[in-house]
Amino acid sequence: MSIPRVDLPADARLDTLAVREGLPPSAWGENSEALFLTSCFVHPDAATAARRFANEEDAFVYSRFSNPNVTIMERRLAALEGTTGCIGTSSGMGAILLMIMGLLKAGDHVVCSQSVFGSTIKLLQGEFGKFGVESSFVSQTDVAEWQAAMRPNTKLLFAETPTNPLTEVCDIQALADIAHNAGALLAVDNCMCSPALQQPVKFGADIVMHSGTKFLDGQGRVNAGALCAPLEMVEAKFVPVMRSAGMSLSPFNAWVVAKGLETLSIRVLAQSASTLALAQWLESHPAVARVWYPGLLSHPQHELAMHQQNGIGGAVLSFDVKGGREAAFAVIDATRVCSIAANFGDVRSIITHPASTTHGRLSEAQRQAAGIGQGMIRLGVGLEHLDDLKADLARGLDALLA
C-alpha cells in the first residue's frame, strides 16, 4: 500500500494546485475533502501494522504524525511553495520549535534577524539558550552584518521577509549564498507574503516556515503552522521529532487551512491592492509621521521587495503617529470597523499596537533595536470596502489634529 497522489498535469499552475492538490477522493467520491477525525487507523493484520509503524510501508498510522487531512494540507502548501516536502504543526511557533529541534544541537549557532517576531527571539535566546544553542541577532537588511556574524559552528540562518511589523525586506539570495558557502541552511518565514506573492526557495532558501493561522487560513479560525522543505529533510529531520514531541496539527485545523489555500491568491491580491491605497493615503495624512509598506516608493527596500514579491507589497502595513503611545491608543480606540486584535491575514482588518502586544515581552532596548516605537500601529488589511477603512482610520487621526 502507498498513499496515492492526485493525477494532475505536470504543468498545473499555482491557482490550480491551490484548489486541486492533496489526496484523491475516497471510495465515496466526495468533491470537497472529507474530514478524518480519528486518532488512529485500523490495519488488516499485525504484520502490516508492524511494517507501517516501522516506516517500511507508506500508510496512515496515528494522527499525531499521519492523517489524511494533514497530508492534504501539506501536499497543497508544498506545491504552492515549490518544495517537495512539508510538515504541518500546531502553530507557527510550533513549526519553529520543530525546525530547531530537528536541525540543531548544543554547541550549534544560529544567525537571526533582530526584527523577527518577538516570540521567536524569546524562543531562541531563552529556551534554546538554556540547552546550549547560541544565537546572534543582526540587522534584517545589512548583508555585511549577517556575514560578520557567521562562525564555524553556524548551522542555520533565519529571517522573516517582510518583517512584522516594520515590513523590512531581506535579500533572500544574498543570505542563501552566505549560508551555503558556510555549509549552513537558510530558513525564511513567509507569513507576511504567503506563496501567493513570494516563493523563497526560488531565491535559494532551504526551508520556508509558515504560521497558517494568518493568510493560509485567511479567516482567523484556527491555529496552524508548517515547514516546507525538501522531502528528504522532512522525513529525516522533522518527522522523527514530530513523532516524539507531538507539536501536531489537528485534522480539523488542517482541513480548515487546506480550504483556505483554495482562495489564497484572490484574497491576498485583493487585500494587497487595498493596502497599497491605504498606505499612499496614510503617507499624506498630517498626523502620520511615517508609513512602512514595501509597495511604497519611499520604502527603503522597495525595489528588492518588488523583485522578490512579484511586484506586490502585501496586505500588512505599519505607520507611526505623531504623539507616541497615547496618540496611537487614541487612533486604535476610535476605530469601529477594524478589530483590535493581534493577528493578521484575516478577511477582517486587524489593528494592533505592537509595542504593547505582539512585541510586548521584549525589553525596550530590544524593541528599539528592532525599530518598534510606542507610536507605531500595525494594520492587517482585510476585505472591507476601502473607503470604510479610510474613514475608520481618519476618525482617530483627524482627532489628533483638533
Image: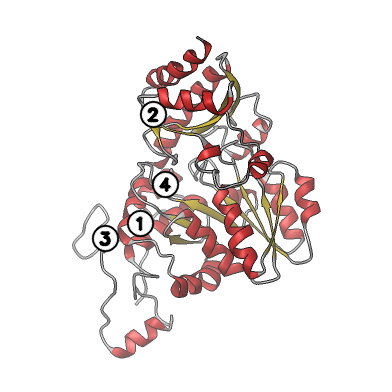
Amino acid type assigned to the residue bearing label 2 in the image: Cys
Can see residue 230?
no
Mark 3 Cα-neighbour bin, 10 Å: few <14, some 14–19, many ≥20: few
Give the percent coordinates (x, y) of residue 31: 24, 53
Distance between mark 4 and mark 1 Cα atoms: 10 Å
In this rendering, the label closer to the viewer, 2 or 4: 2
Q: Where does the image place residue 251, in percent across and percent down from the top left? A: 32, 61
Q: Is there a contact, CB below 8 Å, between mark 4 and mark 3?
A: no
**Is the C-beta separation of discs 3 and 2 under 8 Å?**
no
Which mark is first along the chain, 1 or 4?
Answer: 4
The residues tagged by marks 3 and 2 sit, at their Cα atoms, a distance apart of 39 Å
Which residue is label 3 attached to?
A: 25
Residue 304 can be seen in this image: yes
User: Residue tagged by mark 1?
Assistant: 254
Tell me if 149 is positioned left or right of 15 in this view: right
* Occupied quadrant, residue 388: top left
**N-terminal-most mark, 3 or 2:** 3
4 vs 3, front mark: 4
The residue closer to the viewer here, 363 or 310, is 363
The secondary element bearing badge 2 is classed as loop
Q: Of the residues under marks 4 and 3, which one precedes in the sequence?
A: 3
The answer to whether the residues at label 3 and label 1 have Cβ atoms under 8 Å apart is no
| Three-letter residue code for mark 4 | Leu
Q: Disc 2 designates what residue? A: 338
Q: CA distance from mark 2 to mark 1?
A: 27 Å
Distance between the alpha carbons at the discs numbered 3 and 1: 16 Å
Mark 3: which secondary structure?
loop
* Residue located farthest toward the left when viewing the structure as drawn: 28
- Say if mark 4 contacts mark 1, CB within 8 Å: no
- Left or right of 297? Residue 340 is left
Where, quadrant-wise, is the N terminus in this rendering? Answer: bottom left
Read off the residue under disc 4. Answer: 216
